[in-house]
Image: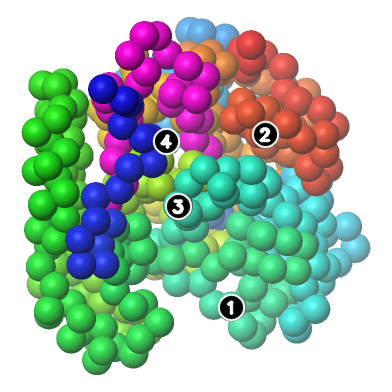
Amino acid sequence: MRPLPRRTFLRGMGAAIGLPMLEAMLPAFGASKDSAPPTRLMFVYAPTGAIPKYWYPESTGRNFEFPRTLKPLEPFRENVLVLSNLAHHNALSLGDGNGDHARAASTYLTGVHIKKTEGADLRAGISVDQIAANKFASATRFPSLELTCEDSRQAGACDSYSCAYQNISWKSETQPLPPEMNPRQVFERLFGGLDLSANESVRARQQADRKSILDLTMRDAKRLQMNLGPTDGRKLDEYFTAIREVEQRIAKPGNSVTPSLEKPSGIPVTFGEHAQLLLELAALAFQADLTRVCTFMMAREGGVRTYPEIGVPEAHHSCSHHKGDPELIEKVAKVSDHHALQFAWLVGKLKSMREGDGSLLDHCAITYGAAIGDPNVHDHLHLPTVLVGGGSGRIKGGRHIRYAEGTPMSNLHLSMLDVAGVPAEKLGDATGKLTELGLG
């Protein structure tokens, strides 16, 4: 029997579901280079930095203690590298005055100093995710996914710069890629056949005429399952169950935010549920090899997001200018802890997904951090950063590595491209690849 093609889709009534890696996709005798699970890259951004004493471990090497904010990652110690002293020199003012938040976001994955403008004459640089997306575009259905939990304005002035600079993903030096915050829109893009360009009433009629995505593709699914072994059958059941659960969570009546007219329907009320829903969609997209590149912003830089569910009714950004006030420091720490908890949820999700001889996490390289260190002083030279995942055997976790002061963050991103098989000689202000990551 011929192996099942890796890019197999179940189809029905405009819906299409990609499949996870199955044993039936492997050659009958041994594994070939083409059948090996691909390496996925993900960049998760936590805005406004973090309280240093709650992020950075005191000791280096293998026996470091996880500080407060990183504590949710402790169960995954062997998959985690904490990296200290990485910097974005090009996020500094360099004579341009105010605008640290705008520079932080747009410099994070590009490593370039942006042009100061509030108009349409933007100038940044291609971001690391898009370099990888260009390489993988022909191998996946979607070159990349850009996700966020806070709507980002694309016009007007934000922090003395054009609001378009609030994006971390840049297709070119003049073209930012705005992230999507609505889980329903992301789900339809990945699995559905709705016309997302149609107006709201047309989309509503389309949605009413449709059944579940899985119902639409059930004929293909049943035919496929008849020809699979028990291991693949169980894996496919788990995958379909995850898709069904995401569908149901999106369809919950409470998953539309009112009375704000600025937020689209399908967005959970609480930040945690919203973040986990989007992160699960990213994980499913990785599992089905719909994309190999994703960026995710917990919120936008300098934004007005509040977190009343954890006792922070004020805007995160306003709290970050704490000036040493213990009460405000604690509120900033609570938000950072909450963001890290959602990231740890993603790590656990990826680790639970079987792929090849290990887990999906083993075939990922994921950064979590920011382009601001201490938020009270808008520090760009001591950036909170962790690298998670096995990188298909090329990353060795379980350590805290402290680099020389001022080591460019772009060196890490250049190294991640290397891990994913996307060699690049230059990225932003990179001076070379990072040592000690375990690259083979």
Circle 2 crowding by C-alpha within 10 Å: few under 14, some 14–19, many from 20: some
Q: Secondary structure at mark 2?
A: loop
Residue 335 shown left or right of residue 438 in the figure: left
Tell me which numbered mark, 3 or 1, is placed earlier along the sequence. Answer: 3
Report the residue marked by disc 2.
422
Q: Is residue 202 above or below residue 51?
A: below
The residue type indicated by label 1 comes to Gln
Nearest-to-viewer mark from 2 and 4: 2
The residue type indicated by label 3 comes to Arg
Nearest-to-viewer mark from 3 and 1: 3
Spatial CA distance of label 4 from label 1 is 31 Å
Q: Position of residue 54 (x, y in %)?
A: 48, 34
The residue type indicated by label 2 comes to Val
Spatial CA distance of label 3 from label 4 is 36 Å
* Magenta-drawn segment: 17-45
Report the residue marked by disc 3.
141
In this view, the residue farthest toward the front is: 1
Spatial CA distance of label 2 from label 4 is 32 Å
Tell me which numbered mark, 2 or 4, is placed earlier along the sequence. Answer: 4
Q: Who's the residue at 48% across and 46% down the image?
A: 140
Magenta-colored stretch includes residue 35: yes
Q: Is residue 409 above or below residue 281?
A: above
Residue 154, which numbered label? Answer: 1
Residue 275, picture quadrant:
bottom left
Residue nearest the viewer, comparing 124 with 194: 194
Residue 117 in sight from this viewpoint: yes
Q: Quadrant of the C terminus?
A: top right
Residue 69, which numbered label? Answer: 4
Nearest-to-viewer mark from 2 and 1: 2
Q: Quadrant of the N terminus?
A: top left
Tell me which numbered mark, 3 or 4, is placed earlier along the sequence. Answer: 4
Q: Position of residue 395 (x, y in %)?
A: 55, 18
